[in-house]
Image: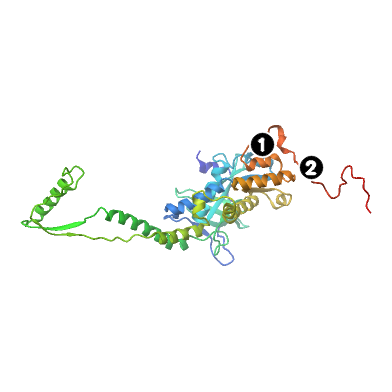
Amino acid sequence: MGIFDRLFGNRPKPQGRYEGVFKMLNGYEPHFTTWGGSIYESELVRASINTIATHCGKLKVTMEGSARPALQNKMKHAPNEFQTWEQFMRRLATILYVHNTAFIVPVYDRYGEPSGIYTVLPERCEVVQYGAQKIPYLRYKFNWGETAAVELAYCGIMTRFQYRSDLFGENNHALYPTMDLIHIQNEGIQEGVKSSASYRFMAQVNNFTKPEDLAQERKRFTVENLSRDAKGGGLLLFPNTYTNIQQIKSSPYVVDAEQMKIINASVYEYFGVNEDVLTNKAYGDAWSAFYEGVIEPFAIQFSEVTTKMLFTLREQSQGNSVIATANRLQYMSNSDKLAVSSQMLDRGIMNRDEIREIWQLPPLPDGEGQAYIIRGEYYSTDEKIAGDNSSDE
């Protein structure tokens, strides 16, 4: 049994007959397709997406509430039997930023009950309806020919640049001009390197009438004077049959540094990153800005999408939810960490275990770090200070 059967083999099949495509308010028939010439093949784009996905993989996923205890117990340490939470979140973010649409499907056990979640990458997805009630389904088609349908209500869809479709994100056509510039830029660098090894001189050779003789003489001259095994001692000699010797001046065009920065900046703006983030130099306020602009929106959307697909409205109203969070304080500079640690600990806002987490240290054993500490000079205004017998005047 393969992973496809594990994901879709145990789940309920669509009831009733196929009733056509599910149409949106604007009459648009929603469908999603992946593009063969993926933007992920670009080095700069891949680095940008991988940076985002790596930080999304650091998000801590927890489930709140008491509903579905069996599901919560299974998902406490992993989203499914094939991946860790870090692997799942990293791949989910990668798919989302490559295709602007990412699908999350429930994993069912042999009893037909949900036991986890998994992200799939279909070649095509369309919304169809089944049965007399015309229940909408997401029908996935994969590039190896298999198809599977899951109720829309039980699937999660994460999107970017959502505009025309009520369900799916837009394509990346807006990035294509920049991708073309990156391709031209890389080709220009390659041609510039090649031109440095091309012909630099030309000469007229007398007493040769056949093209074969010219080719043979050029080969002989190259082997004896310019090849790696040439032993001329640094002295170049040629006969007096060589005349009209001239230097070939080539000036290949190579994209300059400023133009490269402009092209790279277009990619950075498209994905919400910068050079410091890509090279792991961002910390403190710089990393907080990246977190709030990129990682936090991803975490919020993931939390809401998975909460909706795993819990009913009644269960959600009772406080059941999926939450993805990150300890942003870990990305502060050491001086900022020290200031936050001392201020938060002294005032009883954070306990010692929470402070240790900021410094990426394990919690104290036997729950010793769970107690809150308050410095002695802090008192509540509603409490009477011990030993103060003075009366109000």
Q: Amino acid at mark 1?
A: Pro
Q: Amino acid at mark 2?
A: Gly
Quadrant of res 25: bottom right
Circle on res. 163: none
Residue nearest the observer in this picture, 263 or 318: 263
Residue with the most extreme top position: 366
User: Secondary structure under badge 1?
Assistant: loop
Residue nearest the observer in this picture, 295 or 102: 295
Residue nearest the observer in this picture, 325 or 99: 325
Residue nearest the observer in this picture, 167 or 345: 345
Give the colouring mode of the picture. rainbow
Circle on res. 363: 1
User: Secondary structure under badge 2?
Assistant: loop
The reply to whether the C-beta atoms of the residues labelled 1 and 2 are less than 8 Å apart is no
Q: Residues within 10 Å of mark 1 (few under 14, many from 20)?
A: some
Instruction: Give x and y (percent) for residue 364.
Output: 68, 34
The mark lying in front, picked from 1 and 2, is 2
Q: Residue at x 55, y 45 (%)?
A: 88
Q: In the image, 223: left or right of 65?
A: left
Q: Is residue 119 visible?
A: no
Residue at numbered disc 2: 376
Residue with the most extreme left position: 207
Instruction: Give x and y (percent) for residue 342.
Output: 69, 44
Q: In the image, 253: left or right of 388?
A: left
> CA separation, marks 1 and 2?
25 Å
Quadrant of res 83: top right
Compare marks 1 and 2 and give the one earlier in the sequence.
1
Q: Is residue 54 visible?
A: yes
Q: Quadrant of the C terminus?
A: bottom right
